[in-house]
Image (cartoon, rainbow, N blue to C red):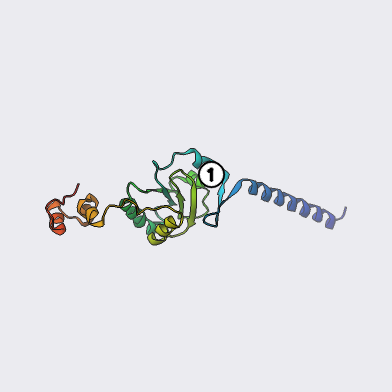
């Protein structure tokens, strides 16, 4: 057999191996289509099975942000996640997972880049995922689009401001200063 024939055989074998690898990797993913939203999310089967086995966020919708402490867009997400955690406590569970400190989480959740935000309903079903920076307004709009009403039973802003220890800590105010700011006698931080 001449040299050209050998090269052709090797090329055909390499192409066949590439096709087998591509077909096998397609079997390892499942395509979830949310008909109501008209959006698709490709979720690795291993992630879908693992997440389904985990308990839901205590009957609450869950926002998981997978990122890293030293990633710039992830750092930009940090205050947004804290705000959501504080403002929607009791209505939304917000989790941050550092994939540089916990590299197995990236595989478990099937992420390709950071930050990645994954939205789950109260039963643990994945509703949506987003890659990259996501503003607070966009996150809240996406929850609304997914049919999750985070505003329901919301504590009035005035009451939150007057009773929140977080406000006192954030603004470095004493309870007396908060009472003066609220201008009512019954207003006191927890």
The residue lying toward the viewer, choosing from 4 and 167, is 167
Residue 100: x and y, percent?
A: 45, 49
Q: Position of residue 111 (x, y in %)?
A: 51, 51
Is residue 71 at least partly visible in the picture? no
Q: Is residue 19 left or right of residue 45?
A: right
The image quadrant of residue 46 is top right
Q: How many marks?
A: 1
SS for tag 1?
helix
How far across and down, in percent of the image, does residue 168 sit?
20, 53
Residue 181 in the image: state x and y as whole percent: 15, 59
Mark 1 packing: few (<14 Cα in 10 Å), some, or many (20+)?
A: some
Q: Residue at x 54, y 41 (%)?
A: 49
User: What residue sits right under mark 1 in the picture?
Assistant: 48
Residue at point 49%, 43% (across, down): 104
Q: Is residue 42 left or right of residue 116?
A: right
Q: Is residue 130 visible?
A: yes
């Amino acid at each position: 057999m001449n040299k050209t024939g050998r090269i052709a055989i090797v090329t055909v074998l390499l192409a066949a191996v590439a096709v087998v690898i591509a077909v096998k990797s397609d079997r390892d993913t499942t395509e979830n289509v949310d008909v109501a939203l008209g959006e698709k999310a490709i979720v690795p089967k291993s992630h879908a099975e693992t997440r389904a086995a985990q308990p839901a966020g205590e009957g609450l919708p869950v926002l998981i942000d997978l990122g890293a402490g030293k990633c710039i867009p992830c750092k930009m997400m940090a205050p947004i996640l804290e705000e959501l955690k504080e403002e929607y406590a009791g209505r939304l569970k917000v989790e941050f997972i550092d994939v540089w400190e916990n590299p197995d989480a990236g595989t478990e959740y099937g992420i390709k880049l950071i930050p990645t935000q994954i939205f789950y309903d109260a039963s643990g079903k994945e509703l949506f995922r987003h890659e990259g920076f996501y503003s607070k307004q966009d996150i809240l709009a996406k929850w609304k689009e997914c049919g999750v009403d985070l505003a329901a039973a919301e504590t009035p802003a005035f009451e939150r401001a007057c009773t929140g220890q977080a406000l006192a800590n954030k603004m470095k105010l004493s309870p007396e200063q908060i009472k003066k700011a609220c201008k009512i006698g019954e207003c006191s931080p927890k």
